[in-house]
Image: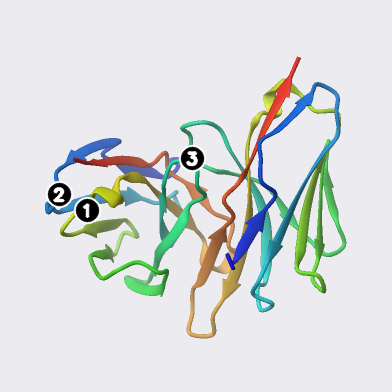
Amino acid sequence: RKEVEQDPGPFNVPEGATVAFNCTYSNSASQSFFWYRQDCRKEPKLLMSVYSSGNEDGRFTAQLNRASQYISLLIRDSKLSDSATYLCVVNTGFRAGGFKTIFGAGTRLFVKA
Amino acid sequence: DAGVTQSPTHLIKTRGQQVTLRCSPKSGHDTVSWYQQALGQGPQFIFQYYEEEERQRGNFPDRFSGHQFPNYSSELNVNALLLGDSALYLCASSLRNLGEKLFFGSGTQLSVL
């Protein structure tokens, strides 16, 4: 089983649609969670952190369920510019120092006019 | 404010050769992590450096080694290159005391022939 698993893509949606991505992680000791966005042939960029209480940034809402080890990202009113790969990211810290960041394989989103 | 810089941007090597990739972290950051990203996959964690020591390591063979310098810059070395080492190599920097949000460089595209 992969440490971080995401919905298989690609997702093809029309402009204005609402789309949801899901992610599960296997290490219950994981401590922090993020969504990153990666455009074609570019580096990943932080989209938002994910908290148990849920957090929202404009059209984007992220949610964490620690009991189910499940993370979600909701995009409302999709724009053409939202087309990208969305990476679910899980961090685990260590008492010896440092942390390990594990990325999911990513979910590709295509928003069409 | 300089972001994360990597060099070279592209590299072509043949099997059995050795390669060194370089990374300068974002100004003020003290931690450097390296990732390998194959086409269509998420970034895979190679290792992380802090205070000039390797702090955490992913599932990569000893052919992959690294170094961090007093100015926080870092090198990734890969010996005895295999065709399967062809990938985008990403460097990410972070500030240890402010959580694990990663800032990525634009990567080095390595092709092994």
- At numbered mark 1, what does the secondary structure look like: helix, strand or loop? loop
Callout 3: SS: loop
**Alpha carbon distance from label 1 to label 2:** 5 Å
Q: Quadrant of residue A92?
A: bottom right
Q: Which residue is mark 2?
A: B15
Identify residue for label 1: B82
Residue visible at 14% across and 44% down? Answer: B14
Q: Nearer the viewer, residue B87 or B101?
A: B87
- Tell me the kind of residue under disc 3: Glu
Looking at the image, residue A38 sits to the left or right of residue B3; the answer is: right
Please state the horizontal and vertical placement of residue B49, each as a whole percent of the image.
Answer: 38, 67
Q: Chain of mark 3?
A: A
> Visible in this render: residue A37?
yes
| Horizontal relation, residue A23 to residue B52: left or right | right
Report in which chain the residue with disc 2 lies. Answer: B
Q: Amino acid at mark 2?
A: Arg
Depth check, mark 2 against mark 3: the one in front is 2
The disc at residue A43 is 3
Q: Are marks 2 and 3 in contact (CB under 8 Å)?
A: no
How far apart are the two marked residues, 2 and 3, measured between alpha carbons?
A: 26 Å
